[in-house]
Image (spheres, grey):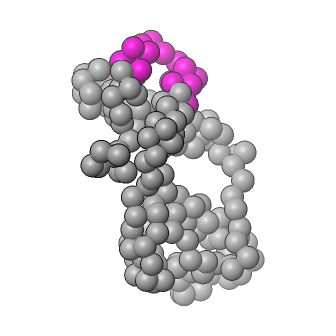
Amino acid sequence: MASGDASRTWFSEMVETLRQEWKSEMGWEQVITLRDRLDAMLQAIRISRGIQPPTMWCPVCKTRTRQAPPSVSVRATILALGRFGIVAAAEVKSLEKRWAKHRKGYSLDRNGKSTQAVITRSTPEGPSAHLHSATSKRTLDVTLEHELQRTEPISGGSTRDSCESRPR
């Protein structure tokens, strides 16, 4: 494994695929399909080369754990178009704004999938469950926040995990 590959998301094969398949007249369904292919390529590259996600130190449980593996979102695909010189910066900005509007209008997640079909996981440990995956943590926090608003009066106390120190 080359130095830095653990944190790397865009490999040369993926960039070449993006260059070959990108068309400015693509519809959002085609962009989402391209994103799906690029994400599948990323996962296949990481598996075939034995690349593990980077590790992090957790100050709460005092252990070194693996971070969530990287993935390719629709926005990351759009930003990569500018980063690798496939389209002009002005077009990237326009695409990004149009994606945000489309995503909001159709209730899509970062990968272009319907958020109404997303099932969040719950943990038997309850609201203060200690999670290391940032994505799982955010999903759990939002789910728990909605559940608490429905079942308990809002109090001045915080329901955030002690491992999470950044503001929302």
Q: Position of residue 130 (x, y in %)?
A: 56, 77
Q: Position of residue 44 (x, y in %)?
A: 52, 36
Q: Is residue 110 left or right of residue 117?
A: left
Quarter of the image for the C terminus: give it.
Answer: bottom left
Q: Nearer the viewer, residue 142 or 32?
A: 32
* Residue in view at x 29 percent, y 20 percent: 86
- Residue 18 is a magenta residue: yes
* Residue in view at x 59 percent, y 86 percent: 155
Q: Nearer the viewer, residue 48 or 131?
A: 48
Predominant SS of the magenta segment: helix
Q: Nearer the viewer, residue 30 or 48?
A: 48
- Residue 7 is a magenta residue: no
* Residue in view at x 38 percent, y 41 percent: 9
Q: Is residue 24 something that shows in the picture?
A: no
Q: Is residue 122 something that shows in the picture?
A: yes
Q: Position of residue 132 (x, y in %)?
A: 51, 69
> Height in image: 62 above or below 109?
below
* Residue in view at x 71 percent, y 67 percent: 122
Q: Nearer the viewer, residue 115 or 11?
A: 11
Q: Is residue 164 left or right of residue 87?
A: right
Number of marks in the rendered image: 0
Q: Is residue 3 left or right of residue 59?
A: left
> Height in image: 140 above or below 30?
below
> Height in image: 81 above or below 148?
above
Span of residues in magenta: 17-36
Q: Position of residue 128 (x, y in %)?
A: 60, 81
Q: Is residue 74 left or right of residue 147?
A: left
